[in-house]
Image (spheres, rainbow, N blue to C red):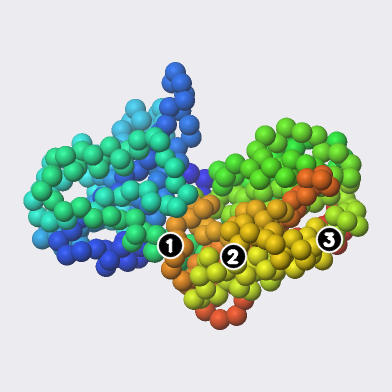
Amino acid sequence: MKYNLIDRNLFINNRKNFASAMKPSSLAVFNSNDIYPVSADSTLPFAQHRDIFYLSGVDQEESILVLFPDCPKAKHREILFLKETNEHIAVWEGEKLTKEKAFETSGVKTVYWLQDMEKVMFELMTQCDTVYINTNEHYRANVETQTREDRFTKWLTHKYPAHSVAKSNPILQRLRSVKDQIELDLMQHACNITEKGFKRVLNFVKPDVWEYNIEAEFMHEFLNNRSKGFAYTPIIASGNNANVLHYIENNQQCKAGDLILMDVGAEYANYSSDMSRTIPVSGRFSERQKQVYNAVNRVKNEATKLLVPGAFWEEYHVEVGKLMTSELLGLGLLDKADVQNENPDWPAYKKYFMHGTSHHIGLDTHDYGLLHEPMQANMVFTVEPGIYIPDEGFGIRLEDDVVIQNSGEPFNLMRNIPIEAEEIEDIMNA
């Protein structure tokens, strides 16, 4: 890992909060992700399962966390099972966590090697009535691959069929959606790295540069600041490419007079940032481009103010739709008849702004959070309105990451990243 050691109190508190929501005489298990094969002996870079990371800080493969708050043996109330390191592994792969380092990272005192797991689990399962399994119930999830967690759950429920089964996910959805200050600091750091990348790009872009050249400039800055890279697949979309919402080819040349929509964010310590900015290839917006740009920015600013404790996600999006409708009328993209005759299930503004305005962000770019429950302080949301006009050859999206506050407007983690049209022009022409 490239990031600095995280204060283990974060993970200690996370486990305490999870345990307090468990049923009496229950046990919960969390597995690391697999290292996924590509072909031959090639593998994808390892990415840790966010849940075991959230609860332990352990960031390596073949790891298991067990929580058993009511265990008769105090030392078995929290257990880590880890892949045993040795000299061969240290030479070929680099040293894995020792028991001492695992405690320093996680605050978990009892650490066993993985080969002892089945023996220890047998003892634990004779002492509990309910086992919490960890399934992916995120509203965007569409997983076809059988994960290490899935295989473990299948083994556990087959070997111990008499136990009651409960779900970890609803607990995690609530806990992970409200951020600890340590998490907010890590997310701020990720946003600061993104800021450095964007400022580098503002001084780099000129007519005839290629989209992938811009992607490379971001990556250079991210890696130089202890990030693994992009928190998600970056979008560098010039001209009409911006009207493809998930354009990721990034293989076209940027032409004078066009705009470039960039949806990128650095990760840091597995925490995400998520930024969208739209800039002119030639360093100056046309009058029409600036008109639309400022409309999107006004919607973003007003939508941000609506993110307050007690607000509901679905109702929030209805209000943002009203803001966008007003701007589209002002731009001449909609007329009153379009609005009067609109389909309530697909309002008129959706022709030019077809995606949602906000989503939770944290360890995952589309982070955990129960959308039917009211917003709370210390939840972090993106705010990302856009206007997409294929007939005019451009699309504009602007996006910041903001923290809901107990009172007042949300705190913008991207407050230092240039966004005003004139500021963008000034930097690009300095």
Residue type indicated by callout 1: Leu
Q: Picture coordinates of residue 358 (x, y %)?
A: 58, 60
Question: How busy is the neighbourhood of tag 1: few (under 14 within 10 Å), some, or many (20 plus)?
Answer: some
| Position of 315 relative to 167 (above/below) | below
- The part of the image, by quadrant, that contains residue 191 is bottom right
Give me the residue at 65% from left, 53% from top. Answer: 354
Residue type indicated by callout 3: Gly
Left or right of 91 on screen, residue 385: right
Residues under labels 1 and 3: Cα distance? 37 Å
Give me the residue at 72% from left, 64% from top. Answer: 339
CB under 8 Å between callouts 2 and 1? Answer: no
Q: Picture coordinates of residue 216 (x, y %)?
A: 70, 38
Inspect this view and state whether residue 399 appears.
Answer: no
Q: Of tags 3 and 2, which is closer to the observer?
A: 3
Left or right of 252 on screen, residue 286: right
Front position in the image: 283 or 389: 389
Q: Of tags 1 and 3, which is closer to the observer?
A: 3
Question: How busy is the neighbourhood of tag 3: few (under 14 within 10 Å), some, or many (20 plus)?
Answer: few
Q: Give the residue at mark 3.
A: 332
Q: Picture coordinates of residue 292 (x, y %)?
A: 81, 59
Front position in the image: 188 or 135: 135
- Disc tally is 3
Q: Give the residue at mark 2.
A: 317
CB under 8 Å between callouts 1 and 3? Answer: no
Give me the residue at 74% from left, 40% from top. Answer: 241
Quadrant holding the C terminus: bottom right
Q: Give the residue at mark 1.
A: 370
Inspect this view and state whether residue 133 appears.
Answer: yes
| Position of 48 relative to 399 (above/below) | above
